[in-house]
Structure formats: C-alpha cells, structure tokens
Image (cartoon, rainbow, N blue to C red):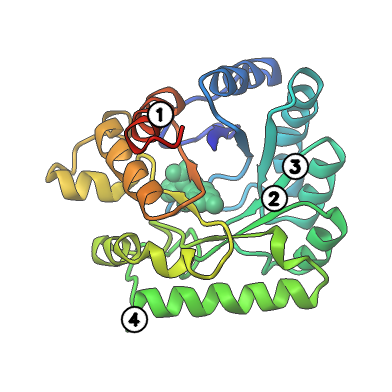
Amino acid sequence: MGVLNVTPDSFSDGGAYPTPQSAVAAALAMATAGAQIIDVGGESTRPGSGSPGVATELSRVIPVITELRRVSSVLISVDTSEPDVMRAAVAAGADMLNDVRALTRPGALAAAAEAGVPVSLMHMQGTPETMQQRPHYRDVVGEVLAFLRERVAGCVAAGIPPDSLILDPGFGFGKNLEHNLALLRHLDVFVAEGLPVLAGLSRKGLISQLAGDPQVPASGRLGGSLALALQARASGARIVRVHDVLPTVQAFRIMDAIENNS
Ligand code: 7PM
C-alpha cells in the first residue's frame, strides 16, 4: 500500500500536490513501482493536528480518486474517518476504507456497511491532537487486541461481513517506543485472529528513536522503514503501508526469491 497524502501539511513526504493530476501521477508511479493499493488521505493525522473539516477533506480526495479511477485499475483506499467522505469516495471508485478511528465516528459504521467494501480498523489511544503526550497501557498487546475485537464485533453487528475486515495495531498512534516494539514483536497475535493485518511503520518516529538520532528527518528514515516493513511482512502482515514503494517492493521481491515463493 503506497501512501498518497493530499494534504498541504504532510509531515513525512512534504509533498503538497498542486493539482489532482499531479497527485494521480504520483499514484501511478507508485503503482508502476509495484504498489497494489494506493491510500489516498486528505486529513493529516499527525500528532497535534486538528481536523480539516468534511468539505475540505472531500475537495482534496474526491478529484484525485475520480481521476485515478479513470486512468488506472490499481486498488484505491481512502484514509478517512468521515461517513460522508467514505460514501463519496466509494461512489467515485474507491475499493476500500482505511479508518484510523476504526469506524467510531457517528454514522461511520452504517456508511461502511452501506459502501460494501473492505475496511481497515486501526487502534489509536487518544486523539491525534494529544495521543503522543502520555501514552499509557498496562498490557499494550492485550489492550490493542481487545479494542480491535470489540470493533470487529461492532462492524459485524452493523452488517459488515467479517471477511472484509482488516486489523491494524496503529503504530505511533498513542504509543511510545516500548509500546511500538511490543506490538511489532507480537504482531503474530494479531495475525492469529484470522483477518488480514495492515502495518503502517514507514518513516515513523520510532525509527529516529531507535537510530539514536532525534534529528533524522522523515526523508532520512528509509533504512529503518525497510527493516520495519520486512519484519512486519515476516510476522505475517498482509498489507504494509509505505511511502517508498520501489525500495520496499525490491526488498520484498528479494525475500520472496530467498523463500522461493515468488
Ligand atoms: C504522523 C503520524 C503523521 C502518523 C503521519 C502519520 C497509518 C494510517 C497513517 C497507519 C493506517 C503516516 C501516518 N498511519 N493508516 N495512516 N495505519 N491504517 O505515517 O499506521 O502517514 S498517517
């Protein structure tokens, strides 16, 4: 899954696209590089960020999804928590929903059920505004798992088929380094639920923390991002959300060849 941020303030790729066409060109480049899904997001969920509002989010993502659908059959995911954006995105051709709030906003469960597409459910502690201030867990793996199970039950009760759900522990979303490492070490626990697992680790802050240099900018985190993507893949993650598609696909193809299952 390649990340396509269509926000003016994206922290990690700095890429503000001046037009829908330029965003679509970036999406096509990721697809050519081997991305099977393009995740189009119009809300910055960076720590400390506010919500742009539904109208702004719609104006950012819908023209891009419409144009990408017109020119490509690559799978399109929409990164949103807003029911109106979910509905409009699927009407414009999106193939799946990626909600960092796991369909907790009013109307989101019903919108997703009506849309009839797969949904990724992510765990977050707190809100993007405050989540990194003081993350706390007694048992991070158990608590994240319990949350995701509760959301799966809520989705099924709302009429979403269980086999269209994807689980995501939400690396960096209300987690400190210790929490992120525990989730990564125990990713098999989530895989054992029997649903596909999505892991988003690309360019995240834990890379700087582990590399011992808080100054490493997002664009200098490729080595760490690749190590984390390979680890997630080895643990059974089925979808890895990344900014750097070409190097990630290259690394995955090498591993496929070594494992002789390419
Ligand atoms: C700050 C923190 C800025 C995190 C940007 C991010 C995920 C996601 C994002 C994830 C799923 C980024 C993230 N991360 N969706 N959206 N899983 N499902 O690095 O881990 O782009 S935003």
Q: Closer to the N terminus: mark 2 or mark 1?
A: 2
Q: Closer to the N terminus: mark 3 or mark 4?
A: 3
Q: Position of residue 253 (x, y in %)?
A: 40, 29
Residue 49 seen by the camera: no
Residue linked to disc 1: 253
Q: Position of residue 60 (x, y in %)?
A: 70, 34
> Where is the N terminus found, in terms of image quarters?
top right
In the drawing, what numbered circle is on residue 97? 2
Q: Position of residue 204 (x, y in %)?
A: 35, 45
Report the side of 135 relative to 153 (left or right): left
Residue linked to disc 3: 95
- Comparing marks 2 and 1, which lies closer to the viewer? 1
Residue linked to disc 4: 139
For mark 1, give the secondary structure: helix
Residue 215 seen by the camera: yes
Work out how far the residue at label 3 is from the one at label 1, CA to CA, in angstroms.
25 Å
Report the side of 209 relative to 256 (left or right): left
For mark 3, give the secondary structure: loop
Contact between marks 3 and 2 (CB within 8 A): the answer is no
